[in-house]
Every structure is written in C-alpha cells, then in structure tokens.
Amino acid sequence: MSESRELLALRSVSKSYGQVPVLHGVDLSIRDGEFLAVLGPSGSGKTTVLRLIGGLESVSSGAIYLDGRDISAVPINRRPFNTVFQDYALFPHMSVAANVGYGLSVRGRPKAEIGKKVAEALDLVQLGAFANRQPAQLSGGQRQRVALARALICEPRLVLLDEPLAALDLMLRRQMQEFLKSIQREIRTTFLFVTHDQEEAIALGDRICVMEGGYIRQIGTPHTLYYRPNCPFVARFFGDNNLVPGTLGAVDGDLRAIDTALGRLVCSTGGDTALMQAPEGTAAFAAFRPEALRPAVEDDVNRFSGTLSEISFHGAATIAHVATTPGDVRLRLRLASQVEGIALGEGETLALGFSPAQSHLVLA
Amino acid sequence: MTASLRPASLFLALVTALVGIVLYCPLLVPILSSFFTVTHGQADWSSPTFAAYVALAQNDDILSALRATMIVGFSTVVLSVSIGTLLALYHNGRGAGAALLQFLVFLPFLMPPIITGLALLIFFREVEFPRSLVTVVIGHTVFVLAIVYRTVLTRLRSLSKTLVEASLDLGASRWQTFWRVILPNIAGAMAGGAVLAFALSFDETMITILVTGTTSTLPVRLWAMMRLGFSPDINALVALVLMFTILLCILAARLLMPAKDRAAH
C-alpha cells in the first residue's frame, strides 16, 4: 500500500466562510486505492475537506491536484468523484433504479447500458430485488446502500463518504462497516471517509487523518496513531491516553526522562528524532493508556501511589479514577476485571506503576 | 378514541360547529331557494325547478362575465405561478435581498384590497395605461403572487439541500438538476398554489371593480345584481360559485398534502 502512487493532493488549502476561517493551509495526499478515514470532532474541518474535494465548495487559497493536475477550478459536475451524503440524498420522486441510474442518465448514455449497469450496481450492494421500490419504502441501511450504488455507478476515481453511518444504530453500523470495507476491496476504488467516531476510523481506514480546529494533526496508520500520537490532541482523542504535563530530562537510548508532578518518569520516545533532540526543559507530556497503568511491580521505574474513586464495571474491564500521591494528578485506570489477589475498592490507596515501553512522550 | 372525549377536543368540536352554523348555514337559504320559484318574496315550496339555472345559462351578461372571470383566472394563474416560482427559487438560493423581496411580495396580500386597487388605478391613470381585463390580470397577479410564492418556497425549504448537491455531484448540469430533481418535487406545490390563486382570482371583487374597464367579472356582476335584491338567478349563481369554490379548495388541499402523507393514506 505504501508504494502506491498519489491520486489526489491538497496543497496548503485554506477555506474561510466570510471572515471565519475553517481550514488553515491543509496538506493532504491521498493514495490510489486506499481507504482514508478523516477523523475529527465537529467543527474540525473534516467535512469541509470532503466538500472541497467533491467540488461542493471552492477553496479560498491553495490548490487541489488530481494526478498532478490542478482541479481547483473544475466544477462539481465535471469532477470524477462521487459522494455518499450523510442524509443519503436519494431523490424521493424516483425509484431505486432511477436513482442509481441517474449519473449515467444525465450523461445521455443509452437506456440498455444504463439498465445493465444499474442491475450490476444493485447486485453489488445486494439490493437486486429492490429496483422498483421508492426510497421511502426502504430502511436506513438499504437507503445507504442505494446511495453507495448510485455513487459507484459512474466509476469515480474517488468515493467521498460524509459520515454515512452516523444515522444507523450500532448493530447496523458494524455490519455496514464490514460491508463498506469489503466493497472497497472488491472494486479497488479509493475511498475517503469522514467520521467523528475513532472506532469506526480504526475499523475502516488503511490510514487515518486526524483533524482539529481546521488543522490536520496527524496522518498515519491506525497502529501509528494509537501507539505514536504526535500531539496531545491525538493522544487524548484517539487513544484516551492519560496525559501528565512536565519538562523533558535526560535521554537514555530510546527512553527519555520527564519531570512531572508525579516525580521523574521515564517514557519511550519511539525513536522519534524531534523528541530525542528537544533540549532538556522542553514542555511535554508523559502519555500512557488507562490499561498501561497497573499495580506496581518490584522494579518499576515509574512508581507512585494512587487513591481509587468512581470504580465502574465494564464486563471484561473495570475502569477507575485515580488521584495520585504525590501531585494529586487525575488519571484513568483500566484493569482486567478478574485479577488474582486484587479487589478494587473506592477510597483504597495502592502502589501503581507503568512500564516505559507502554508509554510515550508527546511534545506540548 | 379516548382523545376525542377530552374537554379540549370537545371545545374544539363546539367551536367548529358554531363556525359552521353562523358562517355557512345561511348560505343554505339561497341554495335551497334557487330550486323554487319565488313570487312577491314568498317561495313556492310545492314545485322544485331548475328554471333559475336555465335562465342563468341564457343570460348573456352572466355568460360574458363568466368568460371574463375564466380568462382573468387562467391568465393570473399562469403569471403568478411563473413569477412566484421564480421568486421562490431565487429566495431559496439565498439570493441577495431575500427578506426585502418577501416583504414586497406579501405587501399587496396583507394590505386592504382597496388600497392595492386604488394604488394600481392611480398608477394606470398616470402612465395612461387603458383599463381593461389586462389591468385586472395585473391587479390579481400582484394580489395572489404571495400565495404561490409562499407555497412553493415552503416546499423548496422542505426539500433536503443535498438533493441538488447530489444531482450536481452525479454529473448533472444546473439545468438538468432543475428539470429532473427540483421541478418534479415542487410540481405539487405549484399546482396547489395555482388552484388557490385561481380561487382567489375567481372571487376577487374590490381590486377588479377599481381597475377593470367596461367588462365585468362574475363577482362584480353578482355584486351589481344583488343591489336590486335576491332574485332566483342570484341564488342559483351563489349556489354554483359555492360549489365551484368548494371543489377548488378540496383540490388544493389534496395537491398541497405532502407526498409522504398521501402515500400513507
């Protein structure tokens, strides 16, 4: 996947609505054939990115390139991309077949060809028997699949999906995630998928682009983002990390010390040169996941005591809030519910620790 | 079922009944008496007859008034539906000055008709535009434009904005999008607006009296006849106008009902 060529690129793309900037000089490269998830909270600019690529909005500055050619000025109806809208946007006065065939019909393709391709597209989304229904007669999941078939029939270079699963219930959403992924593999078309749900982004994306406040914070595989977040926002939004602020200390191989309210901690830099080369005293965060935090063992370098509160049982795991001594830092702790010899109780104080390998540093 | 027994529902039913009795029951008198001969103010209840209707059909004044009403009605519909739809499309596309536009469109509808009529009359006189059915059509169009505009705009607003985006996204031109996506979805509202516009034009009297030339429309004719008292042919005319108006209202209500509800019925 990493060797595949670039299909689409955004170069310093900015967008403002009147005086309100929503996107600040974004650079993004989309590879041919990949499933790219754009993840961010509402107001992060992720939908704007999709609308700019689709041609529903025009860029305020910067440019969008397709196969290296600037397409910023190409109008929406001449861009070889198709969109699956959040509300599906099926034409209510047309049958399912007419909806799916619309893209070919407006291009003046012959009826026989349209009929054949509509049947193929409906078979692909497993709705072959529904061709003559009206959109109002379909369930949410079925409408979603019609919208997908309608977008795919024009054989777009890139399919844009604007939170298409947001309106579905959890069970259906899981099914549709698998379905989308399998269709994308089958037709080998590039998908750009916008979502605010990190689990969905992990389930679908070959790569994930995390956005916040009109900036792209990090782009990488789900694995990279999960284990090597590059900023406090990604660490918090993507992995639910505990973040303890501090200042960087001495480097020791792949590890580096950080002075925090919990005392001196030792965390992994993951070999990141920016982290290794940052001068001592630089502001940073020690980041570790709730499941990395555990009762202390004999040779823990990262060791402190914590008082438990708000213990909640989540089946396989139990989650608790921890107030540390020293520092009174608030952390989250996630333990397997059944651990030999440990009974968690509110107000209980115990020695806690985490291994440097299961932590990392993030520059502030 | 239990809902209909609640006090609020009972009260509502009572008010409805009262409105019916006070407003519309009196109309039964001319309708009933249109089927009987009246001599010296006394109806002869023994022999029902269609004589009044036959007389009406042979009354050239009435027939020419009816023809004028139809011409004015249809012309008004064509003009108000085209202009009203265009304005609604412009407004919905968030064209500049939408609020001002809405105000201007609604002004003649909310103003007393006599003001609108007088204003038009003075205008036509000042620009030396001869008064005729053309001026009546202009007057009616100005008056009913708001209805068509509002009906179409409401339907446009209820359409998801993404429908237009989806159409363009799938490669359609703006023109194709209008014909294939927007128009089919607002056609019902346009037809409903047209029927309402026709109904309003059909019984518009005040503006018509002020701006018409020598030709009378049906309500103007009716009004002139009523000054001499209620004759059987007036009764017959009232009955026919009432029936026609009720039909138009039913038609408009059906057309304006959202497609979703219609499918469910």
Image (spheres, grey):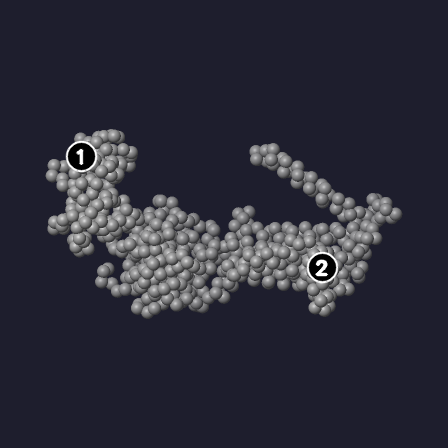
Up/down of A247 relative to B186, above or below: above
Tell me if A157 is positioned left or right of A253 in this view: right
Please tell me which residue lies in front, B155 or A196: A196
How many badges with numbers are in the image? 2
The amino acid on which the numbered mark 2 sits, given as a three-letter code, is Leu
Q: Position of residue B107 (x, y in %)?
A: 63, 56
Q: Which residue is mark 2?
A: B118
Q: Residue at x 37, y 56 (%)?
A: A22
**Residue at (30% x, 61% y) in the render:** A27
Rendered image quadrant of residue A58: bottom left
| Residue type for callout 1 | Ala
Crowd around label 1: few <14 · some 14–19 · many ≥20 (10 Å)? some
Q: Position of residue A3 (x, y in %)?
A: 22, 62
Split into 4 quadrants, where in the image is the N terminus of chain A? bottom left
Circle 1: element type? strand
Residue at 57% x, 59% y is B101
Q: Is residue A148 visible?
A: no
Quadrant in the rendering for residue B97 = bottom right
Farthest residue to the right: give it. B40
- Residue occupied by mark 1: A351
B45 left or right of A225? Answer: right
Chain at tag 2: B
- What subunit carries mark 1? A
Residue A235 position, x and y percent, is: 26, 48
Left or right side of B137 for B47: right
Against A102, is A301 above or below? above
Mark 2 surroundings: few (<14), some (14-19) or many (≥20) residues within 10 A: some
Task: Work out how far the residue at label 1 is from the one at label 2, CA to CA, in angstroms.
Answer: 92 Å
Residue B244 on image: x %, y %:
70, 53
* Element under disc 2: helix
State the residue at coordinates (38%, 49%). Answer: A166
